[in-house]
Structures are given as structure tokens and as C-alpha cells.
Amino acid sequence: MRFGLTEDQGLFGRSLRGFLADRLPLDALRRLAETGTGFDAELWRGLGELGLHGLLVPEEHGGAGLGMLDAALAAEALGYHAAPAPFAAALVMAVQAFRSAGDAEQQRQWLPRIAQGQARIGLGFAGLAGQTGRAALRLEGGRLSGALDGLMDGGEATHFLAYLPDGRAALIEAGAPGVTATLRRSVDRTRALVDLDLAGAAPVALLQSSNDPLAAARRVRDAGRVMLAADTLGAAQNMLDRAVAYAKERVQFGRVIGSFQGVKYMCADMATMLEPCRAMVWYAAYAQDAVPEEAAMVAAHAKAHLAEVGREVARLATEVHGGMGFTDLLGLHHQFKRITFDRQVLGGPERCRHDAAVAQGWVAA
Amino acid sequence: MDLTLTPKHRALREEVDAFIAAHRGAAPRPGGGRKRPDRKALDWQALLLEHGYFARTIPREYGGFGAPHDVIELAIIADAFSRAGISPGIHNQGISMLVPTLLEVGTEEQKRRWIGPTIRGETIWCQGYSEPGSGSDLAAAQTRAVVEDGHFVINGQKIWTSSAHFADMMFLLCRTEPDKSKHAGLSYLLLPMSAPGIEVRPLRTMTGRAEFNETFFTDVRVPVDQIVMGRGDGWHVANVTLKYERMLLGDPNKLQQRLEAIRRMMEQPGADGARLLDRAEWRDRLLRLQGEVIAARNHNMRLLTETAEGVDSGLGRFIVKYHGTMLAHRLASLALDVMGSTGLLYEPQGEVAEDDPATTWQIDYMYDIGLIIGGGSSNIQKNIIGERGLGLPREPKAAVPAGRN
């Protein structure tokens, strides 16, 4: 027994971070962020070559069959570099959705397409996760109507997986009749939100094979929450690393500013808050696969706690940079906004903590 | 990551739960490290040692249980006791600081002589570190020991010696090599508090009690072999002890115990019949702290694994004391708020008898600030985190005004 990463996992994280550092120097990131779609075909292809598309897809369906902790390491790397790439919804939650509520035929049909990077699925969860926005969908006579706001990874999605209030999920094609997808650029230009308006759209698949559709939906929500926590961990770590590096080189009053206790203590406070979050994210991810009785509780707590710590680190790291931190020139704001985004989707911290209380039986849902 | 419980682990969990169910009537309340263990605490300690729920990995020849290091086993045991809200055994400076120090750098003779009686709670230790003129600047210690006919002869003064008034022994940091540089002139001695020439004066604190003391040394004689490592190695040994002290002060199991105690209070109906746990604003305060305690516990598991694998956790370890003591204080703060005005009733029972819960929480709430300061204050911790953990440069030395040094 051990609480830590395997050698392979360490290697995987490092190689992904190396790839992203190479592909996303600041000028490239700035250019990609202009569209606000959260997607770039070339980056997407490169991530596919590293095996990211099929990370969680079982080997029998053409994926790598890895676990939620591996996915969290990927999310952390993507957050670290503020990568404009669909991941949490398209490559984690969607796979989880098919695996927990898709029938054998649906899995056989769709999981290989996800693993090959052909199906990029935006996913909407609004009401069930406590996300704000419209969440009024109904399925009548096999047709889907109504509105669903704030879909994740929807920028250049080929499909949308829309959750119904009862926990079933309908997969619809992006360009199908009756589907209006409005791209909403978010403050985080590396990820967009999509609002869906449906008027009698015909789903290409209805995921309803679970005996308990709401429980299955919650597992998808929890997987997404862990990914957002990991994304914030990466983004905040990036901001801390850069603040420390800046504090070692910036000179004022004839001294590097990192020798001033005022600045040093800001860095120490960030490290003190953030360092325990790493183990927390590891455990929350691991629990999704291995500790089902704790999975919902620790996912909710990780999401909420990282949101709180992320917000503090985002402010302090910007402050350490002084006026430069506030400029576009350094590009620190990409991670700042990443953290801002992660906090609100799939439920803010208050909602997540409430879900943690429910998961422990402290209070009724 | 592999936290799978083997059949052996599952059996251990059942065994510990059964043990607790069978013996919980004999258990003292958690905490109590500020008092000399009474008969009940000593008997409980003996029972825990016998079953391997305390000092589990300390070799048998030194009085431990001699089990191989297994992080999950330790976690299972700690979790069972904190869930049940009963004492996991005695945690004092001898057990949590001196014993691991001796295990790391002591001689075979020192291990055989001191570890057994210390972990049984029979030998109580106090720590002779701080002086009036060297608090945060610990290496500036001026208490001196000179060698005369096979003995160290000690003169000087220590302060903040918690437990000195009931301790049997002291581990002492003093200057034995005055000609050497500040850090290289120190030695780490072990001496009985009954030695002639030691005077202990209680130092009353804000809790109304005297948990600390001033300790004065006048020609106190200690045989020269009562030294850990060699002359001039005191700073190294002191830092080994500080490493364990800081882990003790940030102990996440204590945090978990507190969290559970607060949750139980919030589950009790108040005078109006309502439970605070049912009210969103109270529940959210508890949940926020629960999230932080989970992070601290996960982090601790990571550190335990790294230690078992011989990895120096560096930054991960440096943050523990600062993080843990601040979180402990916030937990005590919530406990006071939950109790409200009934929690203001304050009747400390002195050195031996158990305090009532309200008094205990009030003491914890105040004493926690002492823990935030002691063992290297939070600001010292932030220096360590910034300089040793993050590689930031040291503060340049400012000139000392004439006449002060």
C-alpha cells in the first residue's frame, strides 16, 4: 500500500507538461485564446497522439483504460498551462456517462469514437450540479425540447450530452435539426460555455441503462468536479511558481524582493495552502475508482476547497508581481481566469459543501 | 496510489473497532498532554502498547510493538480512535519528540534505556530550548556547560519549559563550545530534573494556569555520557527534535478528533430543540473546516509514504506545523461559537483532574496560540517555507544598534 503516484504516473504528468510547455508559449496561448472557443485543432491532435483522447476508454474500445487519478494528472497539466482543450467534459465525464449508463451497444458505438478524437462531446449538467442558468429540458415522444445553459467543452463540439432532471442523458448531434447551440465566450478565453435551445431535437442515443439514473449522473458530476479541482491545482501551482520565480529576480530598494519578508510570506502562505491540495486531489480522484462510499463526499470537498485556495493563490500571486501581474504582458491572467471558471461550473463551493453534507447523511438532499 | 485494504488490514480494522467497543469505558478523554498522566491514562497506555495500537513500529527491544512500517495500519488505528472520540494514547514531548530523535540519532544504550519508560508514560520529559534572550533565534542559546571531572556543569536559564514542574527528565540545548561559532558551539544533553541546582518557577499564562516554567541552572552536574551525538552536534540534534515537534504540532489526527467533537456538539438539539447542523450557515462553517482537515489528512498520508520510502518531503514537511496549528485554532474557534454563552463558563481543575468540555475548549482556544508561537513561531515557519522550501533568499542582516547584541 502506498499513498503516492507510480513511476509511470510521474512520467506521464511530466511528459504532458513538457508537451504543453512546448506548444503553448505565451504568444501561442494568447493567439489561441482570441477565439474563446476553448478548442484548437492542432493542439487537440497533439493531445490525441499523447493518448489523452482515450485515456479513460477501456482497452476493448480502443482506449488506454487508465483511471481517474491519471485523468486528474492530465487535468492538472492542462490547468497549469491553461490549455484551450476540451477535457473534463469531453474526455472524462462523457466517458464516465457512457460507462455508467450506456448499454453495451452504445458503448461499442461511441467509446471508440471518443478515443479516436472524432466525437468531442460537450456536456450539460446544470440543475443536477447546482450550476446556475436555465435547466429545463423535457423528452416527449423521443424528442428533446427546452433550454440548457452552461455546457462545458461545447465550443467546437461534435455532440452534446444533455442531462435530464431525472438523471438520464440524451446525446444529440451539434448540427441536427432543432438544435441551436449558442457559444458564450467566458472570462476564461481558454474555455467557453454553450447555451442550448432545443425544439424537438432527436437524440442519437439515450443513456438510460442504469438502475439508478440519478446516482449514475452524480458519478459523472463527481468525476467532473475532481477534474476541475485538479485543473485549479495546476493553474494555482503555475501562478505560485511564477510568483516565486519573479520574487527571486525582481529588484527593488537594492534587493531582490523575495528577500523581503512581506513578499516571502505571501509565497509561503500560498505554498502552505496549496501543497496539501495535491494529496487531496490525488485521493479524490483515486476514490472515484476505488472508494465508492467516499467518492461523492471527497469530490465535492476537493472541488470546494480548491476553489477557495485557488482564489487566494490567484490574488496573492498576482500581487507578488506588482503592477506587472495586472498586465496582459505577463499573461498570468490566463491561469487567474482558469481558476475563476473552475469555481463556478458544476456548482460553486457552497453548493459542493452542501453536497458533501448530503453524501455524509448530515442533511437531506 | 494503492490504498486497498488487504484481508489483513480489514482484520485489523475489525480488531481495533472491537477493542474500542470492549474497552472504551477504560479510556481517558483525548488530549491531556499538558498534565502528568494519571493512573487511568497509564493503564490505558499499557493496554494500547500491549495491543500494538501505540508505538506500533518501535522495535520490541526498546519497548514498542515491533511491527513493520505500514502507513495503512497506522491510518486505520488513528482513524478508529478519532471516530470513536477516545484517547489514542499519551502524546507528550518525550514520546513525540525525544523518542523519534533517539531512534534517529541516539546510541543503542540510550534507546534501550529511555524509550521504553517514555512511551509507557512513566518518564516525563521537558524541553530545555528557549531562553529569555533566544526565542526564535534558538541557536543563540547562552546556557553554558563546562566539563569538570567527567561531568558537564550547567549554568544558565531556560524559559517556556512546559511540563518542567512535573517532568522527570529534560533534554537540554546548551553551549559547551564557547569558542566555536554560534551553531557549532551547542550540545544536546539529557538530565534528571531532580539534579541539585535546578530550580523551576511556574510561569502563569493567559489560561490562568502555569503550563510553562522558567528553569534555572546553578552548577548542575550531569555525567558527560548523557549527551546525544557529540559535543558541538547540539544544533543538528535540536533540529531533528524540532522536525518531530513540528509534525506533532501539526498532527492531522488531532484535527480530525476536534472536527468530530464539534460535529457531535452540532448534532445535539439546543435549548430550542433545533440542531445547529440543520442550519446552513453553521453547517457550512463546519464543512469548510472538514475540507481542510481532509486535505491535511491526505497530505499526512503522502508524507508518511514518502518517509517510509526514504524520500525527503522538503516543502511538504515544512508547511505542516504552520498549517496544522492555524487550522487547530480555527477548529477551537468554531467550537467556542457553537457553545455560545454556555461555553464561557470556565473552571480549570488544576493539574490532575479532568476539565469540563467548555473549559477544555477555552483552554485549547488560548493554548493554540501558544502552539502557533512555540516550536518555531508561524513567522519562523514562513521563513523556513520561503527559504528552504521555495528557495527564496534570506533577509539581509541589519546592523545591531551599539550596546545591543
Image (spheres, helix red, strand yellow):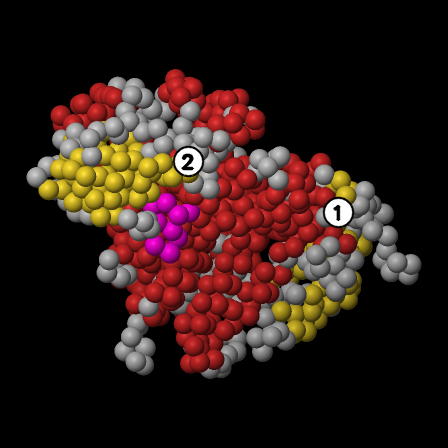
Q: Residue at x 27, y 53 (%)?
A: A359
Neighbor class of circle 1 (other Cα within 10 Å; few <14, some 14-19, many 20+) is some
In space, the residues marked 1 and 2 are separated at their CA atoms by 41 Å
Looking at numbered disc 1 in the image, what kind of residue is underneath it?
Glu
Q: Which region shows up in magenta?
A: A343-351
Residue B316, located in which quarter of the rendered image? top right
Specify the subunit that label 2 lies on: A
Q: Which residue is mark 2?
A: A191
- Judge depth for marks 1 and 2 and give the one in front: 2
Horizontal side, residue B396 vs residue A171: left or right: right
Q: Secondary structure at mark 2?
A: loop
Q: Identify which residue is drawn at 50% across, 22% down.
A: A23
Q: In the rendered view of the protein, which quadrant contains the N terminus of chain B?
A: top left
**Quick check: is B245 in the magenta stretch?**
no
Nearer to me, A60 or B300? A60
Q: Position of residue B357 (x, y in %)?
A: 42, 74
Q: Is residue A231 left or right of residue A137?
A: right
In terms of image quadrants, where is residue B89? bottom left
* Badges 1 and 2, same chain: no
Vertical side of B269 occupied by A243: above or below: above
Q: Is residue B96 visible?
A: no
Quadrant placement of the C terminus of chain B? bottom right
Image position, residue A313 (x, y; %): 54, 47
Nearest the eye: A86 or B334: A86
Q: Is residue B162 above or below residue B393?
A: below
Residue matched to label 1: B395
x 66%, y 53%: residue? B380
